[in-house]
Image (spheres, rainbow, N blue to C red):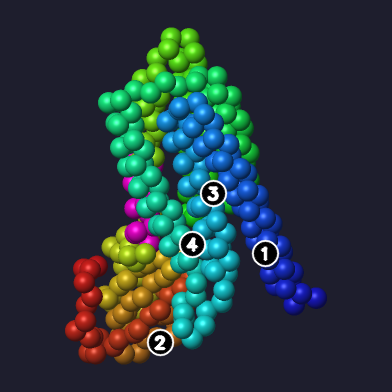
């Protein structure tokens, strides 16, 4: 009964997606609860670093909410208004999350500079206790998202945010200890600046990947030149031009090109079959659109990239 396998695989995939959504929702609830505790603790203790960590945790919760919504939208099938489907919803969500992260980093840096200019007293024990609790929550959230992060830029962003939070919590614990031992209150805004710098660096690095996909950039790991060379090596191909490579989503690479046949007697269908097989085997590209041209019928539209 081989006809049952696709249905079984599809059913298993839906179950896996639902389980992933439940894990993300659990992570949202945990992070929102932690944010409230950290804000209250930061206000009571006077710790800007603790409030900074709370805002970062809140951004994690918001990014997870966006991630859940984007995952559900991305699973919608193509329709007349979106013929490519909705897979890029997750990339858009990642772009939103990274942009928010960068804005948050700028705000934290601004607040830290103000606190350096006007130092405030900080209650060290409150900082240490709440930051220790935050570290445990960040670790739990990271575990919930770790497996899904390998296959999704959107979830990977949330996972890396939680790792950054865990590091921030460790830093806050160290700051609280230094305040208790040496009454070194300036460590609080200094640490906030470090957290802000890390957030800005992290957001700046990650946002480029989302922008690259949304701008239809060439997928990493391949160049138009090497793809063109592989196609020219296919029997029956004289040349290739008007070549475009892009990602519809993180897991879907597409190729569009015009192929010049080596002679009038060459079978276009067979050449296309060979090119598709080459693209699948060498580059893992399965969405290939080809237009064939006879030697005397080469079009003038060579495309913007010389290959």
Q: Between disc 4 and disc 1, whose residue precedes?
A: 1
- The alpha-carbon separation of the residues under discs 4 and 1 comes to 17 Å
Q: Which residues are magenta?
A: 201-213
Q: Nearer the viewer, mark 3 or mark 1?
A: 3
Residue situated in front as seen by the camera: 127 or 221: 127
What residue did someone put label 3 on?
61
Q: Residue furthest right?
A: 1
What residue did someone put label 4 on?
90
What residue did someone put label 2 on?
267
Q: Nearer the viewer, mark 2 or mark 3?
A: 3
Callout 4 touching callout 2 (CB < 8 Å): no
Is residue 246 shown left or right of residue 148? Answer: left
Residue 51 place in picture, x, y as percent:
46, 35
What residue did someone put label 1 on?
13
Q: Between disc 3 and disc 4, whose residue precedes?
A: 3
In which quadrant of the rendered image does the C terminus lie? Answer: bottom left
Q: Is residue 135 visible?
A: no
- The alpha-carbon separation of the residues under discs 3 and 1 comes to 25 Å
Quarter of the figure with residue 235:
bottom left
Callout 4 touching callout 1 (CB < 8 Å): no
């Amino acid at each position: 009964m081989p006809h049952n396998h696709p249905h079984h695989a599809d059913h298993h995939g839906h179950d896996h997606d639902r389980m992933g959504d439940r894990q993300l929702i659990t992570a949202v609830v945990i992070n929102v609860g932690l944010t409230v505790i950290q804000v209250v603790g930061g206000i009571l203790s006077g710790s800007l670093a603790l409030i900074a960590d709370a805002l970062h945790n809140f951004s994690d919760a918001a990014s997870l909410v966006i991630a859940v919504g984007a995952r559900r939208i991305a699973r919608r099938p193509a329709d007349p208004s979106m013929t490519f489907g909705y897979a890029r919803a997750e990339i858009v969500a990642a772009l939103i999350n990274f942009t928010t992260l960068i804005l948050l980093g700028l705000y934290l840096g601004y607040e830290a500079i103000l606190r350096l200019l006007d130092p405030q007293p900080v209650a060290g024990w409150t900082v240490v206790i709440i930051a220790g609790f935050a570290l445990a929550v960040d670790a739990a959230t990271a575990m919930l998202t770790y497996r899904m992060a390998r296959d999704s830029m959107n979830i990977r962003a949330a996972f890396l945010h939680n790792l950054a939070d865990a590091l921030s919590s460790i830093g806050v614990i160290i700051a609280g200890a230094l305040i208790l031992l040496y009454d070194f209150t300036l460590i609080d805004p200094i640490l906030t600046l470090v957290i802000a710098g890390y957030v800005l660096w992290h957001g700046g690095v990650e946002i480029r990947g989302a922008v690259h996909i949304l701008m239809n950039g060439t997928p990493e790991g391949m160049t138009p030149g090497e793809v063109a060379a592989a196609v020219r090596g296919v029997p029956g191909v004289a040349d290739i031009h008007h070549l475009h490579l892009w990602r519809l989503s993180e897991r879907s690479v597409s190729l569009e090109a015009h192929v010049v046949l080596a002679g009038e007697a060459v079978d276009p269908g067979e050449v296309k079959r060979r090119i598709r097989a080459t693209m699948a085997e060498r580059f893992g590209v399965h969405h290939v659109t080809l237009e064939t041209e006879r030697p005397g019928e080469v079009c003038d539209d060579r495309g913007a990239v010389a290959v």
